[in-house]
Image (cartoon, rainbow, N blue to C red):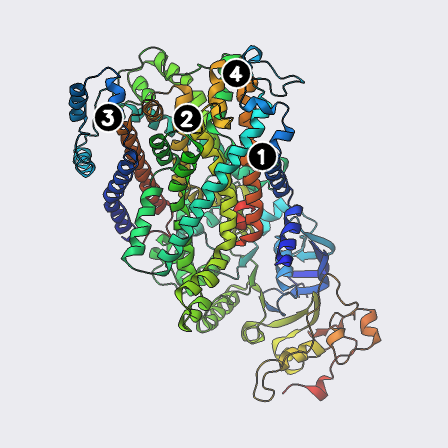
């Protein structure tokens, strides 16, 4: 019950938070009266042409009016028109969101599948050579710049060894978009050749993004397992002669994972932050690449839209983490 | 005070990884200060030698040369100055804004403190880099604007942290007692709450340095940092991309520099936390 | 008499940063069949270490067993393979009631799930050697009936409902009743209860102790009960052994023990109980550091009867009565100085 109220409360805050974010990004984009219209119109445009363009993009009105119009637009799902692609930004964002989410999900999955068992092993065999190797790995994972790691991977696996594609998401056009998740879309239609191509393209960006996430997962799993191993209930199970492997893999892991799950919001945040540059390096057609291209084109509206959608994704992710936590930790419920 | 410092030093020296971290930080500082002396081609920060471009590492050029024929090693040394300037000022400014905001909002329970915290929450609702990109993009590429973008997006983190710590400190018996005895709000904040949270602040600042250096490098990589021909590390990596895989040293060297520096702050921060912040000790090391 | 448990000359040390702490110094100790024995002493006297040594769960990387034997029902527990002890003895023949019923349950599993896991491995109906990967349905059903029956026996209301609850949803007293039920479920010969009531409210302590005593007596189970509280020991124990700084100093049937203590430490301990005659009085001096303990009888620096002999050698066992043993060179004259 309490959990439900908290969740509802958070859902209610979603709208004001996004509105606040909108106000902040709008303010940011109007700190300097830059003139992107002139940039688009070119040097030879006449005064009339510029005025027409200004009217088209709505930048001829006072700033508060612009903000109001913008808010009204966003509420109706209209983020304005991209100065560069000349397409509605909402369409651009929606079409690129699945690519980013697919990459993020695969990376988190990878980080969990590898990071959790390694974290347990490091804790169980504390101070063994494995623990020390994994610790170096953890510390490096959090210190390495994602874009640099991406370039190193490209250099080694794509350029030198030639065993992975250099960039892109798929060879050819990719599957017909249903969900926009290429792995799912291609598997759905049984197009295994495309599926393989998508998976092949995904290896390097996913591993790059998974690397720091894995470090965090491992770190918290190890700490959680250690806490649990030193707990009284494990001592009790041990004193009652329940086999150690049962205690560790059944009892301790569940407790440790609760701690790891609470960190998922943080992990996800770092991951999508890194996705911006990693997508740029791998030419992965997601939101990150869109944002980088918008930066290069000084496309403020697009950047604002990107910021807002990132905020929404991040807030919803955190909400999901909270709900999951409430479900798996009985102490949270009731 | 001296006693405390000596105790800290002894503990840190005993912790091998923290000592390594301290060494790396020290190296960064020395390199930043003595860059003109330590570099082999100090003039290459501003001057170019196009005929000698993209040469592999040699005794003359430890890390080879870049697209303009400049010595990569020398430019990395000067890049350390940019990195340390950005990180120190950005963290300093965000702490100077965030800590007072958190203290005041934590001390007073009224609509204004709620509003301040809500604003912080909005900033924290997106990963820092996202807002920093938006700001840096609007302001245009320069060191000052990177610092501004980082500070503007980092202060809410400190405000939140200090707010929570202040609220819990106000429940401590000795703070309640001094309030009951008529201590002024300023006195309570400065002499009771702040010392209580200082070690946690020191630890977070150290670890925050690492994160800020990474974020600054990312902005540089995206072209939002100081413009060419700045030897900023992130920008150098971005420049190197079109010359891969041949000029591998061009991309590798600056990334390694970022890695070592961030690693230094992270290791040192972990070591500090073990000593200063025993509450979290178990989760950092077990 | 054929005792269930006999500990002989057990010497255990702990490796610490500042050296080897000699926590148990050639301890002799025994528990008879069906007997409830109290192991009494101040914190740090080694009673918990002794209990854990018998269970075979001393911390692996720091504890060193230097000498001695622990004989349980004809088996030398220190000589056997720890793996075998885990499957055959621990949780089956010897069970455990922990000090803190709050944290000894895993907070994220229901009580029922935790009891079921225990029964999967330790049900009296199962063979110890058989791996419990597989939990036969028939046994699961009969085990469940057994569990519900025992929960009623320990006077828990609504046993079915309690099994579905999480540990934080039941009270401390109820959790300790559950712990006692779990200790009885495998039908052991010996229950080791390590300060089982310390974490509970005073009002509940007495109920829990009486319950433990009654159930143990009904089933003929021996109990080794550690406590720092002489009063609780007197209430439920048949016999009491007192430890001081890693040495056992005196062992006697409860009545004898209170009526005629022979060791000076025991006598001072009894006097330190708040009473009408004495008020509150402590024992002068400090509990010694176990890194560098006093030689001979470790109590000698604080003992008013001490002589040079006491520092030179640890006294042997003196039979002071039929079941009354004391280790002192200068025992208190029971006839003259008896505490009334």
Determine whether C127 is above or below C189 in the image. Answer: above
Q: Position of residue B275 (x, y in %)?
A: 58, 51
Q: Residues within 10 Å of mark 2 (few under 14, many from 20)?
A: many
Residue picked out by circle 3 = A89
Residue picked out by circle 4 = B68
Q: Is mark 3 on a helix, strand or loop?
A: helix
Q: Position of residue B266 (x, y in %)?
A: 54, 40
Q: Please identify, in this view, whether the residue under mark 1 or under mark 2 is nearer the observer.
A: 1
In front of the other: B33 or C118: B33
Q: Mark 2 lies on which chain?
A: B
Q: Quadrant of the C terminus of chain C?
A: bottom right
Residue picked out by circle 2 = B222
In front of the other: A189 or C141: A189
* Residue C165: quarter of image: bottom left
**Residue drawn at x 68%, y 65% as measured from the top left:** C29
Residue picked out by circle 1 = B32
Q: Please identify, in this view, whether the residue under mark 4 or under mark 3 is nearer the observer.
A: 4
Q: Please indicate, yes or no, whether residue C91 appears anywhere in the rendered image.
A: no
| Disc on the earlier residue, 4 or 1 | 1
Marks 1/2: CA–CA distance: 23 Å
Q: Position of residue B93 (x, y in %)?
A: 44, 45
Q: How crowded is mark 3: few (under 14 residues within 10 Å), some or many (20 or more)?
A: many
């Amino acid at each position: 019950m309490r959990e439900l109220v908290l969740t509802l409360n958070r859902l209610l805050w979603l709208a004001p938070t996004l509105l606040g974010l909108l106000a902040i990004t709008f303010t940011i984009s109007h700190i300097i009266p830059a003139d992107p219209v002139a940039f688009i119109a070119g040097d030879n445009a006449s005064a009339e042409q510029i005025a027409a363009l200004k009217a088209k993009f709505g930048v001829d009105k006072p700033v508060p009016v612009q903000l109001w119009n913008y808010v009204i637009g966003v509420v109706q799902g209209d983020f304005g028109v991209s100065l560069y692609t000349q397409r509605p930004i909402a369409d651009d964002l929606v079409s690129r969101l699945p690519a980013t989410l697919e990459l993020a999900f695969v990376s988190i999955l990878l980080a969990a599948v590898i990071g959790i068992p390694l974290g347990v092993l490091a804790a169980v065999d504390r101070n063994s050579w494995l623990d020390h190797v994994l610790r170096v790995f953890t510390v490096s994972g959090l210190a390495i710049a994602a874009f640099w790691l991406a370039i190193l991977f490209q250099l080694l696996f794509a350029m030198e060894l030639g065993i992975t594609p250099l960039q892109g998401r798929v060879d050819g056009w990719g599957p017909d978009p249903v969900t926009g998740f290429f792995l799912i879309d291609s598997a759905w239609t049984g197009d295994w050749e495309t599926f393989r191509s998508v998976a092949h393209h995904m290896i390097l960006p996913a591993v790059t993004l998974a690397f720091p996430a894995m470090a965090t997962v491992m770190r918290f799993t190890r700490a959680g397992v250690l806490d649990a191993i030193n707990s009284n209930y494990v001592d009790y199970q041990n004193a009652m002669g329940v086999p150690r492997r049962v205690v560790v893999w059944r009892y301790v892991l569940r407790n440790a994972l609760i701690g790891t799950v609470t960190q998922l919001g943080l992990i996800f945040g770092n991951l999508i932050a890194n996705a911006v540059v990693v997508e740029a390096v791998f030419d992965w057609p997601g939101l990150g690449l869109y944002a980088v291209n918008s930066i290069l084109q000084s496309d403020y509206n697009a950047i604002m839209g990107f910021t807002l959608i990132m905020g929404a994704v991040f807030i919803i992710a955190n909400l999901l983490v909270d709900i999951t936590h409430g479900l798996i930790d009985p102490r949270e419920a009731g | 005070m001296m006693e405390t410092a000596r105790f800290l030093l002894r503990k840190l020296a005993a912790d091998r990884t923290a000592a390594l971290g301290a060494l790396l930080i020290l190296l960064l500082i020395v390199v930043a200060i003595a860059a003109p002396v330590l570099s082999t081609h100090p003039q290459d920060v501003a001057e170019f030698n196009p005929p000698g471009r993209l040469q592999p590492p040699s005794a003359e050029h430890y890390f080879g040369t870049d697209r303009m024929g400049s010595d990569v090693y020398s430019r990395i040394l000067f890049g350390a100055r940019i990195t340390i300037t950005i990180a120190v000022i950005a963290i300093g400014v965000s702490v100077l804004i965030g800590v007072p905001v958190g203290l005041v909002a934590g001390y007073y329970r009224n609509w204004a403190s709620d509003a301040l915290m809500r604003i912080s929450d909005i900033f924290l609702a997106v990963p820092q880099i996202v807002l920093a990109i938006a700001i840096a993009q609007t302001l245009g590429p320069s060191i000052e604007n990177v610092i501004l973008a980082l500070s503007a997006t980092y202060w809410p983190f400190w405000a939140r942290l200090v707010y929570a710590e202040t609220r819990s400190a106000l429940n401590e018996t000795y703070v309640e007692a001094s309030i009951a005895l008529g201590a002024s709000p300023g006195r309570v904040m400065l002499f009771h709450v702040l010392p209580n949270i200082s070690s946690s602040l020191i630890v977070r600042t150290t670890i925050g340095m690492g994160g800020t250096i990474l974020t600054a490098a990312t902005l540089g990589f995206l072209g939002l940092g100081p413009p060419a021909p700045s030897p900023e590390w992130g920008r150098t990596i971005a420049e190197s991309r079109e010359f891969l895989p041949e000029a591998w040293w061009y991309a590798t060297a600056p990334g390694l520099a970022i890695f070592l520096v961030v690693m230094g702050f992270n290791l040192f921060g972990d070591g500090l936390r073990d000593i200063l912040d025993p509450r979290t000790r178990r989760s950092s090391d077990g | 008499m054929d005792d269930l448990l006999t500990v002989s000359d057990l010497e255990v040390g702990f490796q610490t940063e500042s050296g080897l702490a000699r926590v148990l110094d050639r301890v002799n100790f025994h528990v008879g069949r069906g007997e409830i024995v109290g192991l009494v002493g101040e914190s740090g006297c080694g009673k918990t270490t002794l209990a854990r040594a018998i269970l075979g769960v001393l911390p692996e990387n720091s504890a060193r067993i230097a000498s001695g034997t622990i004989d349980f029902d004809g088996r030398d527990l220190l000589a056997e393979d720890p793996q075998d002890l885990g499957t055959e003895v621990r949780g089956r023949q010897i069970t455990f009631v922990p000090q803190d019923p709050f944290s000894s349950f895993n907070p994220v599993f229901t009580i029922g799930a935790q009891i079921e896991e225990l029964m999967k491995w330790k049900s009296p109906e199962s063979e110890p050697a058989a791996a419990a990967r597989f939990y036969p349905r028939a046994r699961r059903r009969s085990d469940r009936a057994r569990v519900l029956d025992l929960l009623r026996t320990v006077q828990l209301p609504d046993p079915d409902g309690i099994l579905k609850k999480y540990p934080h949803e039941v009270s401390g007293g109820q959790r300790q009743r559950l712990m006692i039920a779990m200790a009885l479920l495998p039908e052991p010969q010996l229950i080791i209860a390590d300060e089982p009531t310390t974490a509970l409210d005073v009002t509940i302590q007495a109920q829990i102790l009486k319950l433990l005593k009654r159930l143990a007596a009904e089933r003929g189970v021996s109990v080794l009960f550690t406590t720092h509280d002489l009063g609780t020991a007197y209430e439920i124990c048949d016999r009491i052994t007192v430890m001081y700084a890693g040495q056992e100093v005196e062992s006697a049937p409860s009545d004898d023990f209170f009526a005629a203590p022979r060791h000076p430490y025991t006598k001072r301990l009894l006097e330190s109980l708040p009473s009408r005659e004495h008020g509150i009085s402590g024992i002068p001096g400090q509990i010694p550091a176990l890194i560098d303990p006093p030689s001979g009888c470790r109590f000698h620096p604080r003992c008013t009867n001490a002589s040079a002999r006491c520092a030179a050698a640890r006294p042997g066992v003196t039979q002071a009565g039929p079941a009354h043993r004391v280790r002192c060179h200068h025992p208190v004259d029971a006839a003259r100085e008896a505490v009334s």
